């Protein structure tokens, strides 16, 4: 369950990043394409349970990194302060929580992962 | 970090270490970008656009003497663009604002009189062309979502009545 909700959240974030780069950004929009593409790729990796001991923490860290990167860049420049970015980052925050729970579940001795 | 090392860590410790690394990296890069990049946040830019004419005989030269004034509108990508377009002809002649072969469409509110405080004649979305009769005003608006140079024209007085929307970024 946690794996599929994580996959859905990662995929949604990836699509939103690409949409944002295409329509709104006006600020390093190519980076949004790259970030979105990485998310979509990792959605497939998480869904396939490929190397979960590495992939899950990596996605967890990547989501935190991008969230903090957005927050500090937005504070410094005023870029990315609009509704689409807020929705994108809200989903990303949910993803961080979801990934933390998934990692905990995967590392639990009672769970085959 | 090897698999055997991470296996020895508790989940809480692993999450904490990853979080700290990610936060530090995000703050470092984000702050650097903030210092290095000058960014102008998207804003609403309003332009007044008129038909104009050059002083020559159209029939003698074989082309229309009508032009746009201004014939260049420059904005940043993601800006909201508002163009207040007035047909200031002293003769009974129509003009259009038309964007063909571009990704842009626009909303247009046409007013019956010489300015945008006069009653609304029509209000339409997702247009590629709006027609104005003599002494009418149109308020054209769209978001500059695509960078590049895009042509706007009057379909009746093309090619002389042509302008360029320049979207930076």
Image (spheres, rainbow, N blue to C red):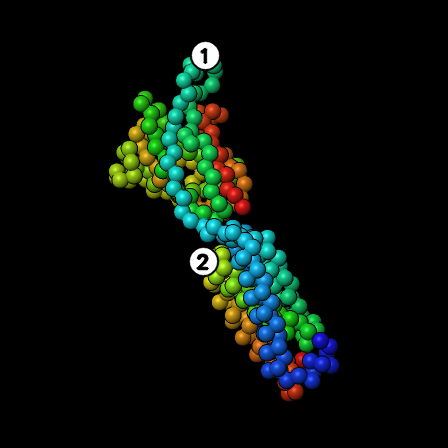
Provide the secondary structure element on which disc 1 rests.
helix
The disc numbered 2 marks a residue on which chain? Answer: A
Residue B82 % position (x, y): 39, 42
Which labelled disc corresponds to residue B23? Answer: none
Tell me which residue sits at (59%, 62%) in the image. B29
- Viewed as shown, does residue B145 lie left or right of B50? right
Q: Which residue is labeled 1 in the image?
A: B60
Q: Which of these two is toward me, B85 or B13?
A: B13
Residue B98 % position (x, y): 44, 34
Provide the secondary structure element on which disc 2 rests.
loop
Tell me which residue sits at (38%, 34%) in the image. B49
Q: Which of these two is toward me, B73 or A33?
A: B73
Does residue A56 sit above or below B65 in this rendering?
below
- Viewed as shown, does residue A37 lie left or right of B74? right
Q: Which residue is labeled 2 in the image?
A: A82
Say whether residue B48 is visible. Answer: yes
Tell me which residue sits at (38%, 28%) in the image. B51
Say whether residue A16 is visible. Answer: no
Which quadrant would residue B59 be assigned to in this image?
top left
Which quadrant would residue A51 be assigned to in this image?
bottom right
């Amino acid at each position: 369950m946690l794996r599929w909700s994580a996959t859905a959240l990662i995929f949604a974030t990836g699509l939103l990043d690409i949409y944002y780069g295409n329509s709104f950004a006006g600020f390093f929009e190519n980076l949004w394409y790259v970030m979105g593409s990485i998310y979509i790729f990792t959605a497939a990796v998480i869904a396939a349970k490929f190397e979960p001991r590495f992939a899950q923490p990596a996605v967890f860290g990547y989501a935190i990194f991008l969230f903090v990167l957005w927050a500090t860049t937005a504070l410094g420049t005023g870029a990315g302060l609009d509704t689409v970015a807020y929705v994108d980052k809200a989903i990303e925050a949910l993803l961080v929580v979801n990934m933390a729970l998934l990692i905990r579940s995967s590392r639990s001795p009672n769970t085959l992962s | 970090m090897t698999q055997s090392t991470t296996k020895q860590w508790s989940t809480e410790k692993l999450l904490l270490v990853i979080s700290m690394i990610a936060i530090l990296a995000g703050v470092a890069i984000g702050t650097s970008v903030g210092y290095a990049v000058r960014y102008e946040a998207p804003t609403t830019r309003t332009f007044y656009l008129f038909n104009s004419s050059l002083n020559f005989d159209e029939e003698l030269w074989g082309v229309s003497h009508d032009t746009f004034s201004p014939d260049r509108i420059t904005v940043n990508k993601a800006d909201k663009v508002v163009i207040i377009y007035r047909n200031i002809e002293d003769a009974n002649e129509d003009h259009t604002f038309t964007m063909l072969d571009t990704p842009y469409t626009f909303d247009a509110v046409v007013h019956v009189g010489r300015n945008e405080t006069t009653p609304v004649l029509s209000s339409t979305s997702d247009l590629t062309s709006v027609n104005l009769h003599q002494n009418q005003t149109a308020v054209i608006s769209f978001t500059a979502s695509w960078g590049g140079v895009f042509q706007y024209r009057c379909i009746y007085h093309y090619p002389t009545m042509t302008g360029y929307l320049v979207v930076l970024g």
